[in-house]
Image (tube, rainbow, N blue to C red):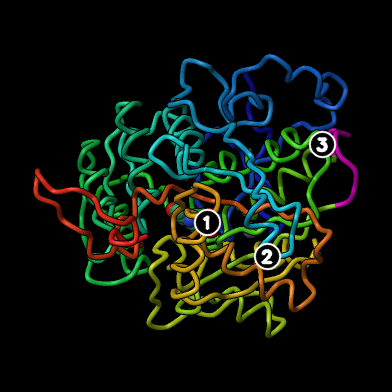
Amino acid sequence: MTTPTSLLCPRCGERSSPNLPRNLCGCGSPLLAEYDLASLRQTWRKEDLAGREASMWRYWELLPVEDRANLVTLGEGWTPILPLRHLGAETGLPELLLKDEGLSPTATFKARGAAAGVSRAKELGIRQVAMPTAGNAGGAWAAYCARAGLDLHVVMPVDTPEMNKLEAQAYGAHVYLVRGLISDAGRIVTRAMAEHGWFDASTLKEPYRIEGKKTMGYEIAEQLGWELPQAILYPAGGGVGLIGMWKAFDELEALGWIGRRRPKLIAVQAEGCAPLVRAFEDGREESSFWEDAETIASGLRVPKALGDFLVLRAIRETEGYAIAVSDRAILEASGLLARTEGLFVCPEGAATVAALPELLRRGVLRSQDRALLLNTGSGLKYPDTVQARELPVLEPGDRIGSPSQADG
Ligand SMILES: *Cc1c(COP(=O)(O)O)cnc(C)c1O
Ligand SMILES: [Zn+2]
């Protein structure tokens, strides 16, 4: 297979070897994997992809696993891109698309990051992994660590969705709850790492999750015939997927597979936790810590992201945008998508739907644009987001009267 040639610091420009376990650069920035794109350009054609496995590993030349024996996979990636004809017509975007990561192993796109991160950790000889999580990353890493035979310690806020607590336990991870936010969980992991020598796999402190998540960008390009859409709406917590897609498009351009045009990268956050939106609106290069973060979209509850400066850079370089939506709008959008398109998405994914009317009104999107929504996970992990009604209860001998008696 292949291996990155180096890890590059996007802040101070320092390069280091990818062949040792690494966290942040000395300057405090996340590190990004680099590949020998110039040689790949000579030898690798997009036609070579035809007939490859229907998973993110079809792009193995640009993924950080050297020995196929270290690959830890549950079949992640190559999720469908679906047209949203009804919803598109209703909102005034006839070419609206949705990439559905709800079909991923562990039911969110965190599977991509975990597959790449755990595979590389295994390859580098790491045995004990620790991480803070808002929920879904813990579940995904627990699954892939179980498959790889690695020990995982996850720390999550006490009010993390029940399903995330259960799945991490089901996969045999050591699960700890913290009375606080993901940032508090992060501090506990940092201390535990120093005391026990565990590897810190926190978002972006670990350089390879983003390599998994970037494959969404390759897939969007390939699945749409190498014609990128005008805009991609991404529900941003730490923003790793957004930075990843930005990186992916740069890599595809370096290979000569796409041109210079980029989709507008649009970060969607929740009004109860919107540090990236605030920084974008204030024209700042970094975000500030968001106090009392709260939203039903738990994956977006990241009060201060380590890679915030990269997210903001990606948004500005692509003439993108950042926008916040209310929890109420998220719940309404979730119901609308389920009823009109048959898609029960996670609240994070629903946030992108909720943002559409305002993006059109502000002229960020135009009706002729082809916009792609990234649905990051399945609604089945969030039973609380269904606005459940009082259902009619029948006795075994009863008949169903007029359908209006039943609700909905
Ligand atoms: C983690 C997560 C997000 C946010 O992803 P980032 O890469 O941290 O921005 C969005 N949706 C779901 C379902 C998540 O689990
Ligand atoms: Zn640096």
Local SS, label 3 = loop
Q: Are marks 2 and 3 in contact (CB under 8 Å)?
A: no
Ligand 1 within 8 angstroms of badge 1 C-beta: no
Instruction: Inspect the magenta stretch and tell me whether residue 259 lies in it.
Output: yes
Local SS, label 2 = helix
Q: Nearer the viewer, mark 1 or mark 3?
A: 1
The type of residue carrying mark 2 is: Thr
Residue 43 position (above or below residue 19): above
Q: Which residues are magenta?
A: 254-261
Q: Specify whether residue 28 is in view.
A: no
Query: What residue is rendered at 45% in x and 73% in y?
Result: 303
Q: Quadrant of the C terminus?
A: bottom left
User: Sequence-wise, which precedes: disc 2 or disc 1?
Assistant: 2
Q: Nearer the viewer, residue 123 or 86?
A: 86
User: Sequence-wise, which precedes: disc 2 or disc 3?
Assistant: 2
The type of residue carrying mark 3 is: Trp
- Residue of label 1: 337
Q: What is the quadrant of residue 121 in the picture?
A: top left
Instruction: Inspect the magenta stretch and tell me whether residue 377 lies in it.
Output: no
